[in-house]
Every structure is written in C-alpha cells, then in structure tokens.
Image (cartoon, helix red, strand yellow):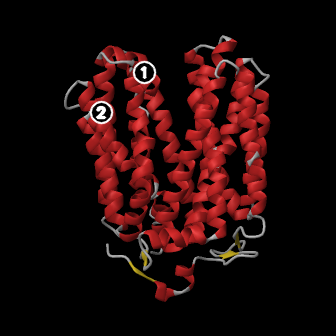
Amino acid sequence: MDRTRWGVLAAFVLVTSSNQMLWLTFAPITTDAAKHYDVSEGAIGALSAVFPLLYGAMAIPAGFALDRWFRGSVVTGAALTAFGGVVRVVGDSFAWVLVGQLVVAFAQPLVTNSVAKVAAAYTRDEDRALGISVCSAGLFAGFLIAFGTGAAFGGRGGLHGLLVVQACYAVIGTVLLALALRRPGRTVVVPTATGMASLRAVWADPVLRVTTELVVVGFGVFVGLTTWLQALLEPHHISSDTAGVLLIVMVLAGVIGSAALPPYAVRRGAERSVLMTSLLVTVVGSALLAVVHVVLGIGLILAAMGLVLLATLPIVLEVVERRAGPASGTAAALIWMAGNAGGLVVTVALAPLLHRPAAAFLVLAAVAAGGIPILRRLSDAWPRRARGRGCWRSSGAPSSSPARANPRMSRPASP
C-alpha cells in the first residue's frame, strides 16, 4: 500500500465509537431506564457490567482470531455490534435489551483489540501514530456520544427513540466499514505460533510484560475515577448533572489529547516523557481533588488529567503493535485484559471510601504514583523510534518481535 486510507479509519472510528456508545447507553439514564422497564437500578447497571465480564472471557480468543483472520474478524465485530443494537429495539422490554447488550459485549473484544492492527494495515509508517491516535479517539468519542444522546433522549418517553437512533448509528458504521475493507491494506502477517504459544511468546517479551503492568495503573485510575466521580463529589453538594458535565469535560479533553499528543510524542521520540508527564499530572491532579471543592477548579483539574491520561492509550498501543508484530492482536488482548482488571480492582478498592472523598482521591494518587517505578523499569528496554524513520531502535532489548526478525517464523494471512 502506497498511501494512507483515511476512509477505512473513519469508518472504523464509527464502529469503535458505536460499540462504546452501546456499552454505556444506560449509564447516564439509569433511574429513568429502571422505571421504564420496571426493574431495579441494579438490573440496569448489569446491562453495562456484562461487558467487562464477557471481555475477560473473550479477549484472548478474540486476539487469536484477529491475528489469524484479520479482516474477517474486524467485520464480524462490527456486524455483531450493529446486530446487538438492532436487537435492543425489537421489543420494548428489559429482556430484549439484555440480549442485545450481550451480543454487543461479545463483539467488544474484536473491536477494541483491532485498533492498532487496523491502523497499521491502512496507514503509511509515517502516519501510523496518527492513525492509532484517531482510532483510539473513536473509543473515547463513544463515551461522549452515549452521554450526549442520553441527555437528548433521556426520560422514560424518549428511551425507545434513543435505542433506535443508536442502532442506526451502529448499522451505518458497520456498512461503511464492510465496504471500505473490501480493499485490502498491507499484507497482514500471521504468526506461526498461534493460540497459547503466541500468548506465551508475547508474555516472554520484557517490554510487553512491563507495559502490561503500566496499563493496569492507567486504566485503574481512569475507570475508578469515572465510575465513582459523581458519588465522590456529592458530599461537596455538587449535583449529579454537574458531575456528568465534569465527566464529559474530562473525556472531551481526553479525545483531544489522544488525537494530538501521541503523534507529537512519536515524531519527537518522546513517548516515555509523555507517559511520565501523564503519571505526574495524574498524581498531582488526584491529590488536588482531595482538597479542591469548587466546580471550576475541579473542571480544570479533570480536563488536565483527561488530556494526558487518555493520550497514553494510543502510545502504548503503537509500541505494542510494533513490538509484537504479527501477534499484535494477542498482545492488544493482553493489554486490554490488564486494563480491565486494573479498573475492577481500583473500583472495588474505592467503594468503601465513597463517603470519604479526600481519602478516595488520595488512593487514586497513590495508584498513579505506583506507575512511576514501573515506567522506570522500561528505561533500558523501551523501543525508540529512529527520528524521521519508520523503524525502531532499542537499548537492552530486541528492536522487534522474533516474528518480524525472522520471516520464516511468520506467513501472510489469508484475506
């Protein structure tokens, strides 16, 4: 391929954002949805909770599938996302919505694990960091769409209309992506070591292993903060509506940061510096949230944290894609699994502190500070891009995966 195909990436962004949107549909309208379907708020919460549960079971198999059948697996993930969205509108009942959510949750690993792989297949080397950033920003854009459409159609009367609008969005994205992927990108190389052997090879790489540990910290802070922000601000007499706006500000800043900062970091060879800055800003920001109770101040702190914290994901995904080579689907699955695990642990750890917000925010600061020594462990092994070139050089570690270094260990994928 001699050019970047931005049309493919644009269609893929529609799919990634629709998958995240369908996941979080009921987060901003939990109470209204519970009344509409005549179920408890806990039952509505389960519509989102099924996603991390299924992800834990499906992430690694989805990674194996993406490494072996790349385009087919991506289209399958998109089609299941759209199908799940349509199922939710078949009948105006909780049962139909639950079935639709389960289908979308089954598709999620195929969609999220393919972010870096799609960007690598349809961009030039010099555009790869930007491509991964754009695709990653699509994930966070799904958060904003979920909250925005929830606010626009929220309330018992507009719930079915909300599901119809979201289903149409998902179907349009799937159709456009299926059409765009009819033209192949770069030849996708399949690792000859598949299944658990591929997973063991990924885990044996010290850069990938320690990067996985770093993701536990980053995801843990982000998921814990977004899950409990409203509850932690309530003791300061900040309404749930205001807390929702603050959360949107944080995610919007993250969309901007994830699209702009990673390409800059890669061009300057400053990936580690950006990651360290992100950790430091998160530590300081979390500590400040323990003492700042003014809405404007909280908004500025959350915007700064979102700007740098969410920008770390595309940086990590690019390094993982280049490092893992043909096994990048499996490596991405490992990264996302670790992130989900970190989010679960931090969320559970914060639950007993909801009535002590200062202590909860200090715990988040401590978690973020724990990522600093992990990042330092990468100082001798983190791959560095040769400035102005589409290659990596490294200190103390191989510059590429064994599959990249030895062509006999890999083979082209079938379309």
Q: Which quadrant would residue 192 be assigned to in this image?
A: bottom left
Q: Give the CA separation, mark 2 to mark 1.
A: 14 Å
Mark 2 or mark 1, which has the lower sequence index?
A: 1
Element at badge 2?
helix
* Front residue (pair 263, 283): 283
Residue 98's disc is 2
Tell how many labels. Answer: 2
Q: Residue at x 74, y 59 (%)?
A: 272
- At a point 39% along the width and 60% down the height, the residue shown is 61
Residue occupying image coordinates x 66% and y 47%: 217
Q: Residue 359: x and y, percent? A: 74, 26
Q: Residue under circle 1? A: 30
Residue 255 visible to an observer of this rendering: no
- Percent position of residue 234, x then y: 63, 15
Q: Residues within 10 Å of mark 2 (few under 14, many from 20)?
A: many
Work out whether residue 222 or residue 212 is closer to the camera in this orientation and state it. 212
Q: Nearer the viewer, residue 369 or 126?
A: 369
Q: Amino acid at mark 2?
A: Leu
Q: Are marks 2 and 1 in contact (CB under 8 Å)?
A: no
Q: Quadrant of the C terminus?
A: bottom left
Residue 103, quarter of the rendered image: top left
| Identity of the residue drawn at 74% across and 63% down | 378
Question: Is 74 placed above or below 51 here?
Answer: below
- Residue that extends furthest to the top in the rendered view of this protein: 237
Q: Is residue 61 left or right of residue 216?
A: left
**Callout 1 secondary element:** helix
Residue 226's place in the image compared with 102, above or below, is above
At label 1, counting other C-alpha atoms closer than 10 Å, the crowd grade (few under 14, some 14-19, many 20 or more) is: many
- Check the image and report above or below for 204 versus 139: below
Give the percent coordinates (x, y) of residue 130.
Answer: 58, 58
Q: Position of residue 233 (x, y in %)?
A: 65, 19
